[in-house]
Image (tube, rainbow, N blue to C red):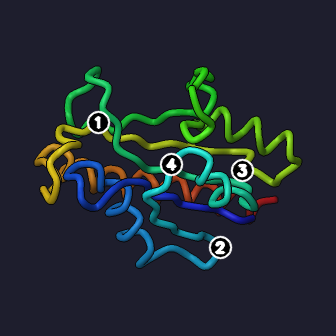
């Protein structure tokens, strides 16, 4: 089974780097059955990264204002609604999934998204805010637990 851990973000923008930092930490320990990728891409460019995998975990920062900074939220791809966008460059996960189906591409059947509510996404060159630093350990742990579960499932089948 091919599994992808995809850490998204931007190293230059304070809390936006959380996905990248989680991926860096996990890349030191993941088995050969798991590919760990760091990326600053978004939209349609993510399609190339996700194609070919059976399962994927995506880690990213979010800023909803609904949660305290540092809160880790698990999202499913179907929790996102398709939003009409002025350009295909703004495609989200629902659009990527639909496009992969239309093109008969092998796209992950199971995607887990771990999003961390950011405190600061706009400070250039800034470090992670304290609440997001605390969330880093939790996210790494949750990804580890998910990977162990998926690898156990694969071994049992």
Disc 2 or 4, which lies upstream in sequence? Answer: 2
Identify residue for label 3: 108
Inter-mark Cα distance, 3 to 4:
17 Å
Give the quarter of the image for residue 112: top right
| Left or right of 106 in this view: 134 | left
User: Label 2, on which residue?
Assistant: 33
Quarter holding the N terminus?
Answer: bottom right
In this view, the mark in front (4 or 1): 4
Q: Depth check: 143 or 102 in front?
A: 102
Q: How crowded is mark 4: few (under 14 residues within 10 Å), some or many (20 or more)?
A: some
Tag 1 residue: 117
Q: Which circle's residue, 3 or 1, is located before the other in the chain?
A: 3
**Dot 1: few (<14), some (14–19), or many (≥20) neighbours within 10 Å?**
many
Which is closer to the viewer, label 2 or label 1? 1
Discs 2, 4 touching: Cβ within 8 Å: no
Which residue is depicted at the point 30% across and 32% down?
63
Query: Residue beneath label 4, please?
Result: 42
Q: What element carries label 4?
A: loop
Q: Tell me whether the residue at label 2 lies in contact with that at label 1, contact meaning CB atoms closer than 8 angstroms.
A: no
């Amino acid at each position: 089974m091919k599994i992808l851990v995809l850490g998204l973000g931007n190293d230059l923008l304070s809390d936006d780097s959380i996905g990248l930092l989680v991926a860096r930490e996990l890349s030191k320990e993941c088995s050969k059955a798991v590919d760990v990728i760091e990326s600053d891409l978004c939209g349609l460019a993510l399609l190339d990264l996700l194609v070919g995998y059976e399962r994927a975990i995506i880690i990213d920062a979010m800023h909803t204002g609904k949660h305290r900074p540092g809160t880790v939220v698990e999202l499913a791809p179907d929790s996102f609604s398709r939003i009409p966008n002025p350009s295909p460059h703004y495609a989200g996960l629902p659009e990527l999934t639909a496009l992969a189906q239309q093109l008969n591409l092998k796209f992950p059947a199971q995607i887990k998204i771990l999003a961390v509510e950011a405190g600061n996404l706009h400070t250039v060159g800034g470090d992670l805010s304290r609440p997001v630093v605390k969330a880093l350990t939790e996210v790494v742990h949750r990804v580890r637990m998910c990977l162990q579960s998926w690898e156990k499932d694969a071994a049992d089948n």
